[in-house]
Image (cartoon, rainbow, N blue to C red):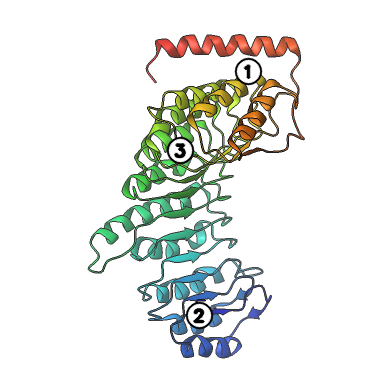
Amino acid sequence: MSISFSIKDKGLKLETADDVKEFAQQIKDTPNLKEINLQGNTIGVEASKALAKAFENQKSLETINLSDIYTGRLVQEIPESLDALLTSLLTCPNLHTIDLSDNAFGIMTIDPLEKFLSQHAPLEHLILANNGLGPAAGTRVGNALTKLAEVKKNSAEKVPDLVTVICGRNRLENGSMEAWAKLLVAHGTIKDLRLPQNGIRQEGIEHLLLHGLSESPKIEKLDLQDNTFTVTGATALAKVFSKWPVISDLGISDCLLSNEGSDLFARALLELETPLESLEHLRLQYNEIEGAGALKLANALKTQAPNLKLIELNGNMFPEDHAVVDLLTELFEERGFGELDELDDMEIFSESEEEESEEEVEELGEKLSKAEI
């Protein structure tokens, strides 16, 4: 069991150096300290500076949780506080994981964050969710992480690769996707990328996929849920999917994938040279996928995803008694493992709408056969 210091979720209001004197001393006096957790307390500038002194040169520190530490703080307080904390953490040579989620950063607080992210060579796992970044600050985060790749490369010490970046609910939008694509190219080592709920529209998704994730051969978990794909994003996904030989968990629920997009993805699966044995979880809820599209996808998964453990299809546009449900249920029974999520919120198409949609899918297939994908 690793040695840790924690005041997690105590709801303390820490204003002065005196307020944290006891905590700072404990941190200084704990040999081989591996983990610090300050989550769920509100920390002022003077308290931050006192804690920062305790953080300095913590040789064994590996993980720090600084999520939700500014509730009730003035916007003007946060940059100085964060700068003190992050500057001290730059002196910790083994600090590989940092969680800064649920803090209202935005553009006002980007300077200290940018400095840390561009300089901290040991960084391996970054958790930065629900910070209100917006596209401008999001671009600067992307650029900082791109610079970090060069810092890692030139480090005199052996440092870990950047493998995890979690940056959901941050309004990254299309405006930051060029920077994020560049960071993915710079860090071809990323295994876990989660960017859900960022207001990224189809052009941004297309750019991220074609110019960033196309250079991510080690990606294992990809979460782009609750952004907008449409056929544009689905076409890009189909083009790059074969470049992820170890993908295990793909989350593209609530992305307006559409029946056409589902068909494109099914075709991409079928075109793989060998079955994708790594794929275990596929999340496709609320994507306006109809019965015909779901059936094509299920048939593709039957041959191309032999180790699939979970497929999520709730909220799509076919009834619970559709043939695709029987096909997937029987498939999982034959394999002895795997499950389909509960289909308790399905949209039901009328027969005429289903036939019209099938005709549209066939027309799309004809167009795609004439075009290069």
Answer whether labels 1 and 3 touch (C-beta < 8 Å).
no
Marks 1 and 2, Cα distance to the nearest angstrom? Answer: 54 Å
Q: Nearer the viewer, residue 185 or 61?
A: 61
Front position among marks 1 and 3 = 3
Q: In the drawing, what numbered circle is on residue 53?
A: none
Residue 20, how many percent across, how many down? 57, 86
Q: What residue did someone put label 1 on?
A: 292
Is label 3 in a helix, a strand or a loop? loop
Residue at x 39%, y 42% (from the top left corner): 181
Q: Nearer the viewer, residue 293 or 230?
A: 293
Q: What residue did someone put label 3 on?
A: 277
- Residue type highlighted by circle 3: Glu
Mark 2 vs 3, N-terminal side: 2
- Say if 337 sits above or below 264 in the image: below
Residue 249, how many percent across, how many down? 52, 43
Is label 2 in a helix, a strand or a loop? loop
Residue 240, how many percent across, how many down? 40, 32
Is label 1 in a helix, a strand or a loop? helix
Image quadrant of residue 66?
bottom right
Position of the C terminus, as image quadrant, is top left
- Residue type highlighted by circle 1: Ala
- Say if 32 sits above or below 357 in the image: below
